[in-house]
Amino acid sequence: MLIALCSVKGSPGVTTLTVALAMTWPHAESTRRLVAEVDPSGGDLAMRFGLATTPGLVSLAAAARRTRDPAVVWDHTQALPGGARALVAPPGGTHASAALSTLATAPDGPLLPAVARDTGVVVFADCGRVDPGSPAEAIARCAGALVLVTGAQGDDLAHAAARLGELARWTPRPGLLLTGEGYPTVDVERELGVPAIGRLPHDPVAAATLAGHRQSLARRRGNNGGLARHAAALARTLAEPAAPAGPPFVSTAAGVPGVPAQQLRQPGGVIIAPGHGPHSSFPASTPPQVSDPRRNGHQPSAAGKEPFA
Ligand SMILES: Nc1ncnc2c1ncn2[C@@H]1O[C@H](COP(=O)(O)OP(=O)(O)OP(=O)(O)O)[C@@H](O)[C@H]1O
Ligand SMILES: [Mg+2]
């Protein structure tokens, strides 16, 4: 099984969630779990978990030129706490991007989708921010499920709305996951015309744990009612077989100021042409929950993760 996770703006917590899903996946003891850092702007896992940057994405890309055996992927992984494996990306966007492009053009494709087809294997692909033309697209397009993680502020949602339709066509099972504070989930669902598969709470303590700091997630499980619990619930949902297509969804509105109406597809595969219902102004119709909502951890950067010269 291949699950892709991505964002379209800022740093809403994709990497954190990817690690959380791998750590809380059901029947973890009988599942080979691989967190694949295929973020073209560079990786964080090596730094966060004190791993080397090799073996990793760069060494796998080189190996993929010589072999067509998907099992070679495991040779380029390292251990994460909790038993999952990590395919780490180098911190620099230039190297990560180049490795991804090489992997995508390997003779038999990027290998990761192939290894994810093995029984008892789940690959969680952290695709980072999927800008148009992202070299992670080739992997995301092979995913059985794709989770778009977004903040719930007006600007976050405007960016998500602009890409939802396109991303939904990449995969049979697209999901919109909200994080942090902002517009109420029900209002976001109504305005974007798609159901959210969940909403992660702002939980800096658990997020720090998932970034390799403080005590382990497993030790915190007993008293953690926030991020870990929500991630575990999402993991259970994703582990279940896809639900059959429901009745056609009729969008009541699809207006986000400054964003052209999108074609939105439901998880069941229904294509919706927004604009059938009345358009409304997102902020005007649904005031934010909080006046000074917090974001997840750090301010997003427009630049990649290249170190400053
Ligand atoms: N639910 C959360 N609550 C609070 N802080 C969070 C949450 N999720 C992530 N964070 C924090 O936000 C910051 C960004 O998280 P993360 O690196 O997972 O985001 P990302 O979407 O992968 O970003 P990037 O696109 O830059 O790789 C980190 O400091 C992380 O600890
Ligand atoms: Mg990330």
Image (cartoon, helix red, strand yellow):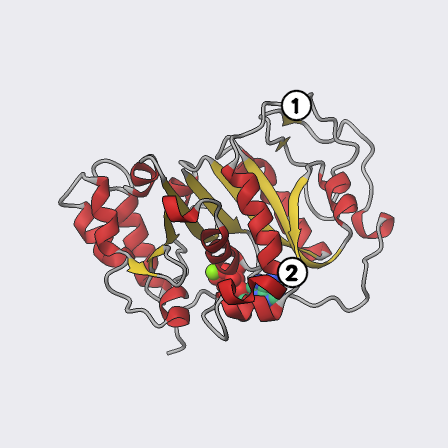
The residue at 39%/63% (across/down) is 81
Q: Amino acid at mark 1?
A: Gly
Quarter of the image for the C terminus: give it: bottom left
Relative image position of residue 67 (x, y in whole percent): 15, 42
Q: Earlier in the sequence, mark 2 or mark 1?
A: 2
Q: Secondary structure at mark 2?
A: loop
Question: Label 1 CB, ligand 1: below 8 Å?
Answer: no
Residue closest to the far bottom: 309
Give the quadrant of residue 45: bottom left
Callout in the foreground (2, 1): 2
Q: Which mark is residue 3?
A: none
The residue at 45%/64% (across/down) is 304
Q: Amino acid at mark 2?
A: Gly
Q: Which mark is residue 246?
A: 1
Question: Label 2 CB, ligand 1: below 8 Å?
Answer: yes
Q: Is residue 80 left or right of residue 258?
A: left
Relative image position of residue 51 (x, y in whole percent): 32, 69
Q: Secondary structure at mark 1?
A: loop
Relative image position of residue 151 (x, y in whole percent): 65, 56
Residue closest to the far top: 247
- Distance from disc 2 to disc 1, alpha carbons, whole Å, reads 30 Å
Quarter of the image for the N terminus: give it: top left
* Residue 50 in view of the camera: yes
The residue where tag 2 is placed is: 226
